[in-house]
Image: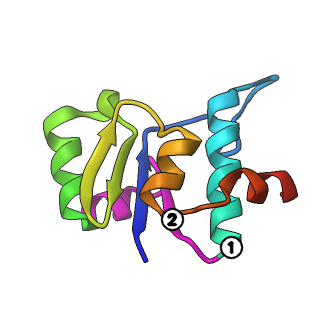
Amino acid sequence: MKKMQIFEGAVCASDGMCGLSVDQELMRIDTVVKVLQNNAYDIDRYIMPGDRKAFLENEVAGEFLRQNGNEALPLILLDGKKVLNGRFPTNDEIAQWLEVPNLPKLLEKK
């Protein structure tokens, strides 16, 4: 099974709540990650500053952050290798990378 890790910079809240407004992209990624985790897919999400230790313990993420700074986040790793940075992956990209044949149906059931 493939393993995906999402390393993000500081956000208002992991579910997309920013005061009285909602960041739709953060809300989408939060939902996708939770649905996949609940269906036994190996996907983790780390958010600065709360998950700083995960950034430092992951050699690829730590080096990426040192070289590029927070501005280049999010960083997406697949099986420990960088596949994307600077934006969140689309649902189609996630489904392809993690070999999820039925992601739209899983999201409907959430």
Kindly indicate the quadrant of the structure image that contains residue 87: top left
**Of discs 2 and 1, which sits in the foreground?**
1
Is 94 positioned to the left or the right of 13 in the image?
Answer: left
Which of these two is toward me, 60 or 28? 28
Quarter that holds the C terminus? bottom right
| Residue found at x 37% / y 48% | 76
| Residue found at x 44% / y 47% | 48
Q: Can you give x and y, in whole percent of width and height, for residue 63 in the image?
A: 15, 50
From the image, tell me which residue sits under label 2. Answer: 43
Outermost residue on the front side: it is 101
Q: Does the magenta-highlighted stretch encompass residue 53?
A: yes
Q: Can you give x and y, in whole percent of width and height, for residue 14 in the image?
A: 64, 46
* Other-residue count near label 1 (Cα within 10 Å), few / some / many at <14 / 14–19 / ≥20: few
Residue 39, numbered label: 1
Which of these two is toward me, 98 or 65? 98
Q: Can you give x and y, in whole percent of width and height, for residue 33 in the image?
A: 62, 57
| Residue found at x 30% / y 67% | 79
The amino acid type of the residue labelled 2 equals: Ile
- Vertically, is 26 above or below 53? above
Residue 29, numbered label: none
The amino acid type of the residue labelled 1 equals: Asn
- Vertically, is 15 above or below 34? above
Q: Secondary structure at mark 1?
A: loop
Quarter that holds the N terminus? bottom left
Is 84 positioned to the left or the right of 97 in the image?
Answer: left
Residue bounds of the magenta highlight: 40-56
